[in-house]
Structures are given as structure tokens and as C-alpha cells.
Amino acid sequence: MQIVFYMQNTVVSLQNASITNENKVVLSHVNFEVGKGEFVFLIGKTGAGKSSLLKVLYGDLTLKTGMGSIVGYSLEKLKESEIPSLRRKIGVVFQDFKLLPHKTAFENISFAMEANGRSDQEIQENVPQALALVDLEDKIWNFPHELSGGEKQRVAIARAIV
């Protein structure tokens, strides 16, 4: 028996998806939905396919079989030219944080907002708020090399929030 939950305001959806990485099937028959405002934790052993699944969701791997969507983009029909637009609509915290080394915490976060076309006023208001959410308002002008590993991760989380 298969139970499928249909939610209003679905943000992420995969139906009977198989995920291939370097011509090797990593996951098969994946079915799930994530609704707006819902928090989901993805856990599993090394090599279980967690990173490959996330790569499909942010357009780094192509969904070859099944159907999927994220924030209105069809994953099986996603064009390379649409990937930057998709990535502006989702927040991803990478394992190595992907912070720009020559930009402060404020600048790393505001850069993401600028790429999304946010106004200077929104940036000035939202960046300090995002840093406060992750308890880093006192590190607003610090560069990544001046932050601990945990602080770098929290800057990356604040960037994903905005």
C-alpha cells in the first residue's frame, strides 16, 4: 500500500523519481511532498543518496525518470538557463558554506538579496534581522576568516533565510 499526502501550497514534490549520478542509480521510486512552511530533515548513511537528492532539487543533477517540481519549476523539464532563477528562489546551505572570502557577513548575505533584485532598503532591514535570527548580529562586519566554523555555518543559514 502507498500513502500519498497532497498538500496545498506544495513547494517540493517528487513522484516515482529515480535519481542517477554518474550513470549509477542512487535512488529509485522516490515519492514525497514538502508544503510551504514545513521543515524536513534528510538523514541517512554515507552514500545513501542525500546529496544527490538535494542536487536534483537545486538543478545540479537532472531528474531522468519520474516527475518533480520545486517552487513551480518542473525538474524533469528544467532548462540550464532556468537554473539561476530557480536558485534565487530557494535557500541552500552547503557543507562548505560557499561564503565569499572577501566579503563580510553582511555583504555575503546582501549579495544573495541583490541577486534576487531586492531593494537597498530591504537589504538594510533584512540582513541585520537574519543575522539576529542566527545570533550573529555582533559579527555583521566580520569576514569569513574571522569567524569560527559554526559562525560561518550560521551566516550561510542567514543567507538561505533571506
Image: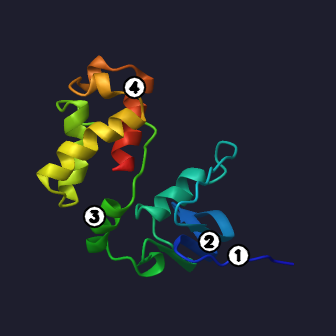
In this rendered view, identify the residue nearer to me: 71 or 94.
71
Amino acid type at image mark 3: Pro
Mark nearer the N terminus (4 vs 2)? 2
Q: Which residue does the numbered mark 2 point to in the structure image? A: 18
| Residue 144, x across and y down, in percent | 28, 26
Camera-side mark, 4 or 2 = 4
Mark nearer the N terminus (1 vs 2)? 1
Amino acid type at image mark 2: Ser
Counting labels gives 4
Q: Secondary structure at mark 1?
A: loop
Q: Which residue does the numbered mark 1 point to in the structure image? A: 5
Camera-side mark, 3 or 4 = 4
Mark 3 and mark 4: Cα distance apart in space: 27 Å
| Residue 103, x across and y down, in percent | 18, 33
Which mark is drawn over residue 132?
Answer: none
Identify the residue at the far left of this view. 120
How would you rate the neighbour count of disc 1 (Cα within 10 Å): few for under 14, some for 14-19, many for 20 or more? few
Q: Secondary structure at mark 4?
A: helix
- Callout 1 touching callout 3 (CB < 8 Å): no
Q: Secondary structure at mark 2?
A: strand
Q: Which residue does the numbered mark 3 point to in the structure image? A: 84
In this rendered view, identify the residue nearer to me: 150 or 140.
140
Q: Which residue does the numbered mark 4 point to in the structure image? A: 151
In this rendering, does residue 41 appear at all? yes
Mark 1 and mark 2: Cα distance apart in space: 19 Å
